[in-house]
Amino acid sequence: MVSYGNRYNTCNIEETYQYQLSDGNVINLGEWLAIQRALNKTSQLPTDRQTKMQDLVDKNVLTWDNSQTLDDYWNLVFEVLLCFLEKYSGCCNIPYYGYATLADNTKIYLGKWVSFQWQQYFEKILPHDRLILFQELIDQDKLIWTMPQIIRLKKVRDEKWKVYYEHLLQYGKEHNGYVNAPDNTVLTLPDKTEVKLGEWLVCLRKLHGRGELSSFWEEKFQKFVDARKFSWKQGFP
């Protein structure tokens, strides 16, 4: 199927399509794809297959719904992105692992999708009409798109995380050394600023689980884990 996609720039194959292998054997590729879609719809598709096919969906060469065109799906995800922007007051910089869940429980992996658009932009293959839509977000400072901007954003994030870490240490002092703050933990500072410790720890755990957390933070939190004051999983160790 990937070979077909590379050749035709789409993996949305008609159900009747048959593919001839180099040894002369013929496989019903379209029928196979229909089965994978059906299994995914009922949550029966094995995780390894779902991951591989979702990667094609995120790259906009496949849709889970066979009645949906690639352009339809792209427009749908962009609308979801704008809804995210409206909900979170102007920031389209979504973590790579970030996703949105639609009313029918379909997951839209926004982070991976935006990352792929960024890749196309730097390879100068992002279609012009789509570039215009993203450029509007860039011009409004709602989307970080260039490497210097990303580096600057990471520096700002690191400084913010250091502040959160200091508040977490204070939290630990007040809870017998335990820093496993519940997900809904929010500290309100004297100036009314909110420090969402719980959400921050959720973020750290996800990055750890994906192997994307920097060694600096891994080492700091592993010390808590070793002391049984923190768990990489939810709940107490």
Image (tube, rainbow, N blue to C red):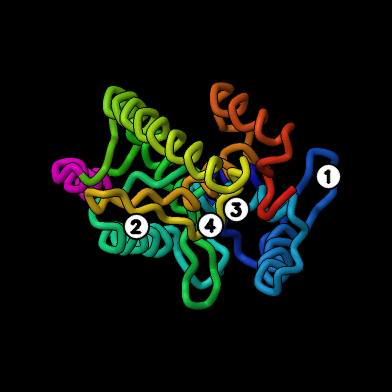
Q: Quadrant of residue 85?
A: bottom left
Residue 181 percent coordinates (x, y): 56, 51
Q: Mark 2 points at which residue?
A: 81
Residue at screen point 58% across, 43% down: 179
Q: How far separated are the C-alphas under marks 1 and 2?
A: 45 Å
Q: What element carries label 4?
A: loop
- Mark 1 vs 3, N-terminal side: 1
Mark 2–mark 3 CB contact (< 8 Å) = no
Q: Name the residue under label 4.
A: 183
Element carrying mark 1:
loop
Q: Give the image location of residue 154, x and y in percent.
A: 37, 29
Q: Marks 2/3: CA distance?
A: 18 Å
Question: Residue 24 bears which disc, if any?
Answer: 1
Q: Residue 60 carries which label?
A: none
C-alpha distance separating marks 1 and 3: 29 Å
Crowding around mark 4 (Cα neighbors within 10 Å: few <14, some 14 to 19, many 20+) is some
